[in-house]
Image (cartoon, rainbow, N blue to C red):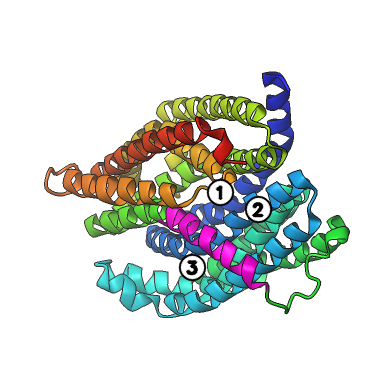
Amino acid sequence: MTPTGHARAIAILGLPLIGGHVAQFTISLTDAAMLGWYSASALAAVTLAASYFHAIFLFGAGFAFAVLPLVAKAAGAGDNRLARRANRMGMWLSILYGAIALPAFVWSEPILLSLGQDPQVAMDAAEYLTVMGWGIIPGLSIMVLKSTFAAQEHTKIILITQIATAVVNAAVNYVLIFGNFGAPELGLMGAALASLVTVSISTIILLICSQRILPEQELFRNFHQPDWEMFTRLLRLGVPVGLTTLAEVSLFTASALMVGWISPLALAAHGIAANLSGITFMVHIGLSNVATIRVGNAIGRKDMFHLMRGARVLMAISLGASATTVLVFLLFPETLIGLFISPDDPDRPMILATGVSFVIVAAFFQLVDGLQSLELGLLRGMQDATVPMGVAACGYWLIGLPAGYVLAFPLGFGGVGVWYGMLIGLSAVAGALLWRFRRLTAEPHALF
């Protein structure tokens, strides 16, 4: 296959995945936008709550991410039984983890207070989490089903489902946050209820679709029966993958906590900048998924030549997407920030000024953030998880987080110093993962 052929195949597989990720992220983006128009205090609370939720959620998503390369390899080898086993035990692990994690949402307020957050913001965030926390099990189940579908290139259903649930979420948000059409005005709680409703609907739709799209695999046949060999295999792969994801997400969570030490308004601005950065990052998450699938398939076929050619094409696409984002962020920062703040909000000028400085730094770390995400996808396709976990932990926690703290507080840069710290940490991880990928592909016999 030529480079053009690889680009075409990546687009066919990747565009629905990217669209699905964007639509999924739109749910939290809609929460932030509508609550920003509702009040600055509500925006600060949902920023803190979302950072807390995603740190816990995305560790558990490691089991779903582990399903992706296994099912992709099974698809490359034509092994339906392996795909069914991976899906079933991925669901088991996700449900078990969700049940264990639930108390961390129900009793989140004392945890947030112990982390130095403003008491009112912590109380409001905990109220949101008490409702939204119940969505962790259906949310993780969605992640497993999406991995099973995507690994076998059934991506259109993912896109359609996520767009539909994003639309439902926006509509329910509009009704419940502001009290429209005779509904009670619930504010922050309205956003939490809307998110819980939409994630539950999405789970039901994907469960139904799994029986119609992949009937030959009978994904839920004998669902109650354990498969301890696959359970252990997914556990060993999923835990380091989850810890790798957690290392990055917790960098952003810790950054939100540090900005929260400055002021609630700074936290609101941080939330806007993080959401803008997050929506563009969904492109790279989609490309990372494509990388995992195509590498897994290539390994299943024992095709090293096209593995490498596809990796180069993916890197070129990722860098092109990042360059576009950099231009948009640098040219229109104030316009982008202003979308999240009511024109009548008395705190608008302060949030705008702070948020613009955050977005300018976010523009530059798009390049390295996209690259490290793609590299992780390539390595996951090779089922290489332990070393990337160590790289991520060191880069984010031993380099990025301390750098952000020093720049923000001892050196007096404030919130923008926290963002510079994230840029430094992401750069270190991107460089180390690129070295790891080159080392593994230099010895292809170890991959097959």
Q: Is residue 89 above or below residue 72?
A: below
Q: Which residue does the image show at 59% across and 70% down from the upper left?
A: 93
Residue 328 in magenta? Answer: no
Q: Earlier in the sequence, mark 3 or mark 1?
A: 3
Left or right, 141 with respect to 211, comes to: left
Find residue 153 and report its horizontal and vertical position in percent: 75, 44
Looking at marks 3 and 2 on the same chain, the residue that comes earlier in the sequence is marked by: 2
Q: Which element carries disc 3, helix, strand or loop? A: helix
Amino acid type at mark 3? Leu
Q: Residues within 10 Å of mark 2 (few under 14, many from 20)?
A: many
Instruction: Say if mark 3 contacts mark 2, CB within 8 Å.
Output: no
| Residue beneath disc 1 | 383
Can you identify the residue that label 2 sits on?
Answer: 70
Q: Give the number of callouts.
A: 3
Question: Along the line of sight, which residue is nearer the eye, 347 or 152?
Answer: 152
Q: Which quarter shows the C terminus? A: top right
Residue 150 in view of the camera: no
Question: Gap between marks 3 and 2, in whole Å?
Answer: 39 Å
Residue 258, image x and y in percent?
26, 56
One can see residue 86 in this view: yes
Q: What stretch of residues is rendered in magenta?
A: 227-246
**What residue is shown at x 43% (from left), y 41% (from top)?**
337
Between disc 1 and disc 2, whose residue precedes? Answer: 2
**Amino acid under label 1?**
Gln
Instruction: Spot the residue most to the front.
Output: 445
Mark 3 closeness class: few <14, some 14–19, many ≥20 residues within 10 Å: many
Q: Amino acid at mark 2?
A: Leu
